[in-house]
Image (cartoon, rainbow, N blue to C red):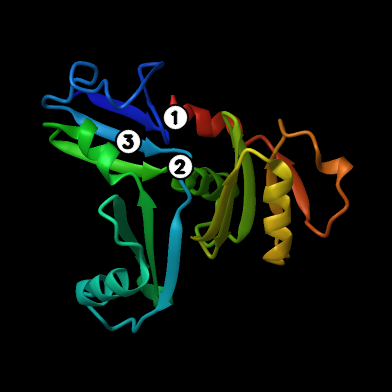
Amino acid sequence: MNKVKILLKQHSYLYKNNEYDFYNTSNVVDTNNSKMQIIILEEPLFTKIFQVDKSIGKIENFIDEKIKNIFPQNGDILYDYERIRTEGLLSIYSIKGKKKVEKLIKEAKDVQVIPIQFFIREVMIKRMKNKKLTCGVIIQIGKNYYFVYIKRGLITCNYISSNLDEIINKIELQQIKDEVYIDESINYVDTYENNIRFIKLNIKDQIYEKLY
């Protein structure tokens, strides 16, 4: 079964190295009998982490209640969750893009939607060989800088901006004291005076392997 991969941006999408707007979907993407992977770019991930009883089995009612009372509700939001049962932790997250995804999936039999923030986390966890990794990550994809803060393997906050200063200021406001891995292609560390502990690392190559 063929695997269709689409990069979803705010105002367009990338398919087979070509960029299209959302008025042009009907004859572009062949989703018949296909597995489909949609990677959401340019959208922040809204996350909330809850402490839950380890003994709780099915927690769907708890999740539904939290989504209804805490998360945005506008018909264009996708929701999902992760649970670390051994830690008693539940992470619920949401991201904008439901309407654009629905335009693209058509008759696809198997659709996987992944925020880019999760690709970044996956690469770092594998790179550090630590499922309970705690660190920050900055990478540039296209014109945007992405910051993802991972705590014990879960994404706790993230920012997207075309302005690197804005990203740095937000990290400082959060008073993040853990190491921040920054892709080695971003040349600015020596020109800033701040309290952030930067470590340069080649992250971009592995991310791009997953994207393209």
SS category of the residue bearing label 1 = helix
Answer whether labels 3 and 2 touch (C-beta < 8 Å).
no
Q: Quadrant of residue 184?
A: top right
Quadrant where the C terminus is found in the figure: top left
Q: Quadrant of residue 58?
A: bottom left
**Residue 109 in the figure: left or right of residue 175:** left
The foreground one among 197 and 129 is 197
Query: How far is disc 3 from disc 2 in space, using C-alphas?
Result: 10 Å
SS category of the residue bearing label 3 = strand
Answer whether labels 3 and 1 touch (C-beta < 8 Å).
no
Give coordinates of residue 138: x percent, y percent: 64, 45
Q: To which residue does mark 2 refer? A: 116
Mark sitting earlier along the chain (3/1): 3
Mark 2: which amino acid? Ile
Mark 1: which amino acid? Leu
Query: How far is disc 3 from disc 1 in space, using C-alphas?
Result: 10 Å
Residue drawn where x is 33% and y is 81% of the image = 54
